[in-house]
Image (cartoon, grey):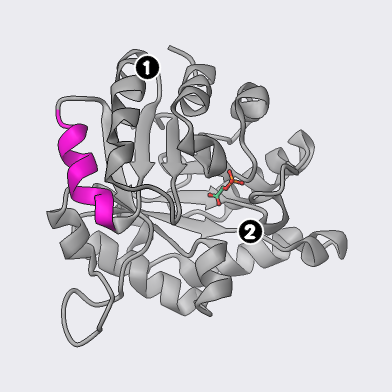
Amino acid sequence: MSRRTLIAGNWKMNGLSGALGYFDAVAPVAAQAAADILVCPPATLLYPVARACEGTRIRVGAQDCHAHQSGAHTGDLSASMLRDAGASHVIVGHSERRADHGESDRNVQAKAAAAIAAGLVPVICVGETLAERESGEAIDVVARQLAGSLPDNSATVDLVIAYEPVWAIGTGLVASPADVADMHAAIRERLPNPATTCILYGGSVKPANAAELLSLADVDGALVGGASLDAADFSAIIRAAGS
Ligand code: PGA
């Protein structure tokens, strides 16, 4: 089995029901794309986005899930609920959740396992802070996050890793091509299923830098935040992955 490029958009806490016209613009671009395309809207839009994307090559993902499939967890959503709403993937361990909600590697691992149990593909995020990069610890930090966040059955299931240096998210700063290539190689070496696991780069991916990032060894796609909110920018990034 070979790896297919994946271009994923993470809308974060953006998007109301009026935003669905976006898919009229992106679906024809996705139809011509060499890559697989995933859009992760806020949970309130999962179902309408899944409906809007029926019959297109755009798949729909969620941005987080609970570690349990049901129960007394007010305000949370389980992986089975997300699947029921039309999701095929779920992002887990995004650095904004690790920071804003104190999520540990152990939490992320439990969420990834719950996603897999519900039939979703987890997109497991890892990445170092600027202080960790500057002190030369980036690879050690990411290796530790990876070891702690990968579920036990990782060797036999479909999952995606997203390397997102925290300092590059939403800042316009991008890791250098050499640093991205080194980190992706380091991640690949530590994966139980290296040949088939997609490793995405995320952090200020834009139309202007997408082609270069996507051409790097071991970069199998992109997780795009801000630029995925604009249909023209996201379409340009999809085109950068080839047709
Ligand atoms: P950004 O976000 O593209 O806006 O930097 C990436 C992400 O957080 O997934």
Mark 1 to mark 2 CA distance (whole Å): 30 Å
> Closer to the camera, 56 or 19?
19
Residue depicted at 60% across the width and 25% down the height: 207
Q: Work out whether residue 102 can be spotted.
A: yes
Looking at the image, residue 33 lies above or below residue 124:
above
Q: Is mark 2 within 8 Å of ligand 1?
A: no
Q: In terms of secondary structure, where does tag 2 sit?
A: loop
Give the residue type at disc 1: Val
Q: Work out whether residue 216 can be spotted.
A: no
Residue 49 among magenta residues: yes
Classify residue 92 by image quadrant. bottom left
Precedes in sequence: disc 1 or disc 2: 1
The residue carrying mark 1 is 29
The residue carrying mark 2 is 127
The number of numbered badges drawn on the structure is 2
Whether residue 16 sits left or right of residue 5 in the image: it is left
Looking at the image, residue 15 lies above or below residue 220:
below
Q: Residues within 10 Å of mark 2 (few under 14, many from 20)?
A: many
Give the residue type at disc 2: Gly
Q: Taken as a whole, is the magenta stretch helix, strand or loop?
A: helix
Q: Residues within 10 Å of mark 1 (few under 14, many from 20)?
A: many
Residue 137 among magenta residues: no
**Which residues, given as a range, are shown in magenta?**
44-54
